[in-house]
Amino acid sequence: MRNNQHKMKIGIVVNSSWNIYNFRAGLIKAFLQNHEVIAIAPDDGYRKSLEEMGCIFEPVPMECKGTNPINDALLVKRLVTAYKKHSLDVVLHYTIKPNIYGTLAAQLLKIPSINNVTGLGTVFLREGISSKIAQYLYRFTFRFPKTVFFQNKDDRELFINKSLVKESIARLLPGSGIDTNHFVPKKPTLSVPSKKEKKAFTFLLIARVLYDKGIAEYADAIKLLRSKGINARFQLLGKIDETKGLGVPEKQIKEWEKEGILKYLGTTGDVRPLISSADCIVLPSYREGTPRTLLEAACLGKPIITTDVPGCRETVIHNFNGYLCEVKNAYDLADKMQRMICLDKGKLKEMGINSRWLAETKFDQQIIIKRYTEVLDKVRVEDARKDFTTSRFGKMRSKVENRKQKQRRIASIQQEKVNPNVRNSRTVLIES
């Protein structure tokens, strides 16, 4: 290794610095106890926060979407430059572009890489030329990583069945992990609220405002509940993204607000107060890796309604800490939301407690840190062996071993010449 036996230079490459700070902070803090961490991402406002955490920040512009070959070739070049600049010992890649082009850059420099497929994205939800290109690129580049982590077994099996990754390096992780000490349920207040203070049952959906997140089904389900005279509050939190027609237009959101269907809350740097104020968290997504918002909801002790699809179903045990509904089915979503409203306070509280238990036992970030540490230790051992074999002492030892083997072969041949029966007896033994 280029560094001493214990300290490594670890690169963490993601398509946004916001993503690194919000989803990888726990992992980074654990690494920083023994290693250096270089955060490599576009500078979208979280550079200072990452540097204050103890990271070295290396800004690298990259597009989240698009398959322009010139831009992608430039991205590989920029990543190669960044990896060489910091003399990385290992690189951790997240999201599509870093997973593909970051792996290629690492391979060109013979740097070990560990990849994490956080979700399949829209390219796998819609068959077409973009999907075929993405699968080809995965198949080509995923020959090189030491390990590829998947956040649910369905994604892992899909990649294996399509021959996009070798089964031997494909491993499972329970999402990005959640800091159970940061997301703590509010303690119930002893005072009894007056009738004026009592609020309507509140549903909250947290996601980028994309059709694939089930935003339209959420709105349609609300309309069905409103038509039945059900009085509840329906909220939506998340960034509006109209890129390539995949996002719900801002105009549509405003129309829903005007009609009194839902309340759009915009975006926030801290979701805890809003989740804590809600009675139930909803995510009718079409497919996920493991949705971070549902991990946060579970950690904060909230009942959950989500779709019975890969990634989402991992966060809910039906009738235990919430309900699973059919994907792209507003009627079934409305039915589950109505059932949730009708639950008594005791059952709602029980579901919330069960959510917290699930977060602590299945999704705690310490589980993720342990898995990564195991892989890093393996990389370190392999690197040490490689350094030994290429060292002066290692080469000398190899020469001695080769000389001994040669001497043993010569001695064996000479013995056969002196006593031909040795060869005959050896042949008999082999044949028998």
Image (cartoon, rainbow, N blue to C red):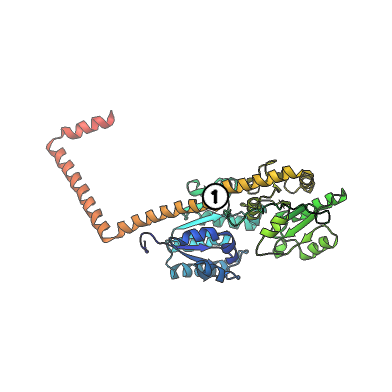
Specify few, some or many for label 1: CA neighbours under 10 Å numbering under 14, 14-19, or 20 or more: many
Identified at 26% across, 61% down, the residue is 392
Q: Nearer the viewer, residue 294 or 389?
A: 294
Identified at 69% across, 59% down, the residue is 273
- For the N terminus, the image quarter is bottom left
Q: Is residue 324 above or below residue 132?
A: above
The reply to whether residue 381 is visible in this rendering is yes
Quarter-wise, where is residue 62 in the image?
A: bottom right
The reply to whether residue 212 is visible in this rendering is no
Q: Secondary structure at mark 1?
A: loop
Q: Position of residue 156 (x, y in %)?
A: 56, 47
Q: How many marks?
A: 1
- For the C terminus, the image quarter is top left
Residue 87 as seen in the image, left or right of residue 58:
left
Residue 142 as seen in the image, left or right of residue 286:
left
Q: Is residue 71 above or below residue 134?
A: below
Q: Position of residue 371 (x, y in %)?
A: 49, 51
Q: Nearer the viewer, residue 114 or 49?
A: 49
Residue occupying the far left of the picture: 418
Q: Nearer the viewer, residue 210 or 206?
A: 206
Residue occupying the far front of the picture: 191
| Residue type indicated by callout 1 | Leu
Q: Position of residue 285 (x, y in %)?
A: 70, 52
Q: Look at mark 1 in the image and give the residue it sits on.
A: 173
Residue occupying the far top of the picture: 432
Q: Position of residue 230 (x, y in %)?
A: 85, 49
Quarter-wise, where is residue 128 in the image?
A: bottom right
